[in-house]
Image: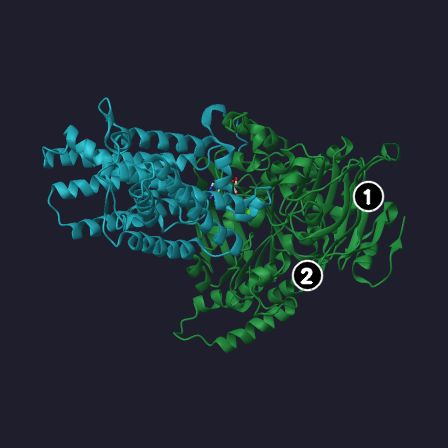
Chain colours: A cyan, B green
Amino acid sequence: MEVAAPEPARGGGNPLKNMFRMRETGLIAIIVLLFAVMSFASPYFLTWVNMRAMAMAFAVEGVVVVGMTILLISGGIDLSVGSVTALAMVIAGWLFLQGVDPWVASGISIASCTAIGAFMGFFVTRIGLHHFIVSLAVMVIARGICLLATGGRPLGLYTLPPEFKFIGQGSIGPLPLVIIIFLVVVLAFDFMLRRTTMFRKVFYTGSNEKAAAYSGIKTKKVIFLTTTLCSALCGFAGIIYMARFGSAQPTFGIGMELNVIAAAVIGGASLSGGSGTIFGAILGTILLSVVSSSLALLDVSVYWQDIIRGSILLSAVSIDHYLHKIRA
Amino acid sequence: MTDDVILKISHVSKSFGAVQALNGVDFELRKGEIHALAGENGAGKSTLMNIIDGILQPDSGEILLDGQVVRISSPAEAQKLGIGFVHQEISLCPDVSVAENIFMAATNVSRAFLTDYQALQRDAGVILSQLADIDPSWPVRELSISNQQLVEIAKALTLDCRVLILDEPTAALTEKEAQVLFQIMRRLADRGISIIYISHRMAEIFDNCDRVSVFRDGRYIVTHKVRDIQPGTIVNAMVGRMIDNLYPAKMTAAQTSDEIILKVSNLSEAVRFNGISFELKKGEILGFAGLIGSGRSEIVKGICQLEGTVTGDTWLNGQKLALKHYSDSIAAGMVYLSEDRKGDGVFLDMSISANVSALKLGQVSGPLGIINTDKEDGQAEKLGHMLNLKHGQLSDPVSSLSGGNQQKVAIAKMLSVDPKLIFLDEPTRGVDIGAKSEIHRILRDLARSGVGIIVISSELPELIGVCDRVLVVREGSISGEVAGDAMTEENIMHLASVLETQKKTA
Ligand SMILES: Nc1ncnc2c1ncn2[C@@H]1O[C@H](COP(=O)(O)OP(=O)(O)OP(=O)(O)O)[C@@H](O)[C@H]1O
Ligand SMILES: [Mg+2]
């Protein structure tokens, strides 16, 4: 009831910080617990090789999770991430096989994915369609293009120069470059999302689009840009995958959208917009990935893995909903 | 009114984290009475109503209905017990028709498996028609706020309730609509239905209620029979001190200036308004009156490029404006306080600080566009203090504030940009008497320091008390102007409703 005394160092400007802090701590606790259990269950689990393999597995997908989280905060969603990532590989790989320099091919490929994002953004903000429908259509179309261009077979890129393959396969010291790229992307976007005016507008728009417009924010532009950014990051991820696999796989990333959305939501992003953090979403990614590799190590069938992943998503969201209710 | 107590609240307490919203509160409601609840913003009125309606559970204390202790676990439970609640904030489903919104509550309590839609539509139609001329088949989002509020009330009336709670229902209504509501309330009371009526407007309490209970800082203070007391008694009990002058002194002749802050010439919009011309002089507070739907909000929204495609010319401090988007208007120093706080005034799930800074993030950030959270908090702290905002922490979401305090956050947001001109649409909606006169005083100070102030209000006493001059809008054009002694409710209502050509009263 009392008028609060000044409270300088609390960082109150950060939206819903308290709640996220609570959630992130919870996620870290669960991940640590899982590590502890697994290190007993399998001697192989805590080895450097396994850690590295797990990190490689979620690092590239983590780049896509970043884009998805930002889009979710602005109130959108993108089902096409898996197909667009595959399309990025196919475009770059196909151009390379036509004799284009791999760096140039990658540049063109990322630009094309960005254009796809802009295309979706146009349909959402100008025509007024829902993100869900537009990205569903693009998901199918992009996959179709992948299959059409390759005849459904992977493009082997055996002649990729080693400097290019270095992006996906090289290491600097003990750290794989992929993980370094991942860390840079995550840290950069985490900071920007928390602290820059540009990304604060994303929160305003997702929290209450009309109130954002009444605060002079060009909400359509914000939504257009977040949609475009998400696809651009998919393009970037696709190139890293291509460098890592040394091939372009038209069927890559089927079902990826579910994983990515689940990770963001487990990490605190809301499907109705206005909340979410990169840090939380990455913890969500790590959790899902650790669970998958643990189950694989324990020889649990892939079918069970899906069931378990789905259940984790459901429980995370339910617990969240429940905590919300208690707080209210 | 009889003396049998129908609802009794005994020693109820409720806290939200560190905030003690209710502290051992007692309250008694008798059969067939209209019982007003008064108290400053954040006194705990809505919290108590939420407890009676089962939305919140008390930390301790009891609720007795007809002398029996009851535990009300949910609003559905409350409905079964015969409790109807019209919330302070409108909570309708915007995309669904008026009729379906009204059914929603009714179908909820019905025990039958199949709903008799025809009967419901008929009932809904009958109840709506006593309140206003609203087509039940329209989607709610098409309605004005006042009509939405009337639908909320109709929704509660379709329930067969014994206790009806109205939390600031008139905040969004025009004078005339409010009068209709009061007649209905009296009819219900005569039928033995008990009504709890929350309002910050003393006149309404004194004209329409039987008893009044006062809350302060989460405590129950006193209950009086309305006819035994004067408004001053209530106000003193509410704030714990005397408030003498409700409205600040007006501009004196010596303060008048020829300097013009805003000049609008022949402003028109396709359908909403036509040929609007007026001037705002430095130091004066200009009012806009008119019935809901007359176009007064649309005109000011048009001036600052929030809505509609507008033709005509505007000058701010002698500079001709060429605005393309509302953000240009903010940059030029012209801001608009929305009448719909929940819909477009605040970001409910974001922090107080983030709300206050939303108009101009550049003010709290460095050259690289990096937000300085200390600066952001400092800004919210300073403006919150100036407006006497009651809050927990600045990082709390705005949804945790009482209605009136949310309004103060919306006002702080406007003031954060050091505006040259502020359009305030219903600036004191839901704000308590103390804070209201505080806001009026701030507006007067701003005007005196050279900031242009234009106030839109449905509350005529407010316009008359605060403004130096009032323009009356009718059907999208200015039907007249009143100033000085001619500023009376009769004159304004006359200009607002009667068909008559441009008429100037000085
Ligand atoms: N969900 C919540 N979380 C935290 N604090 C809350 C919550 N709901 C209400 N409060 C606090 O409880 C106190 C009482 O609020 P309440 O809404 O009952 O006031 P009120 O008397 O209805 O005021 P008003 O006239 O402004 O509507 C306020 O200080 C408010 O900030
Ligand atoms: Mg209230």
The chain holding disc 1 is B
Asked if badge 1 and badge 2 are on a common chain, one would say yes
- Left or right: residue A302 versus residue B342 is left
Figure check: B96 above or below B368: below
First in residue order: circle 1 vs circle 2: 2
The 10 Å Cα crowd at callout 2, few under 14, some 14 to 19, many 20 or more, is: some
Instruction: Give the secondary structure at mark 1.
Output: strand
Near mark 1 (Cα within 10 A), the count class, few <14, some 14-19 or many ≥20, is some
Q: Where is residue B500 in the image (x, y as percent from the top left)?
A: 86, 62
- Chain ID at mark 2: B
Give x and y (percent) for residue B66.
47, 60
Eye-nearest disc, 1 or 2: 1
Using the rendered view, name the quadrant where residue A165 is placed: top left
Residue flagged by tag 1: what amino acid is it? Answer: Glu
* Disc 2 residue type (three-letter): Glu
Give me the C-alpha separation between circle 1 and circle 2: 31 Å
Q: Which residue lies furthest to the front in this view?
A: A99
Kind of element beneath mark 2: helix
Q: Image check: B468 left or right of B382?
A: right
Q: Image height check: is B106 above or below B429?
A: below
Image point 45% across, 40% down: which residue?
Answer: B15
Q: In this view, does B121 lie above or below A295?
A: below
User: How many numbered dots are placed on residues in this image?
Assistant: 2
The residue lying at 42 percent from left, 60 percent from top is B77
Image quadrant holding the C terminus of chain A, namely top left
Residue bearing the label numbered 1: B279
Q: Name the residue under label 2.
A: B177
Q: Nearer the viewer, residue A110 or B196?
A: A110
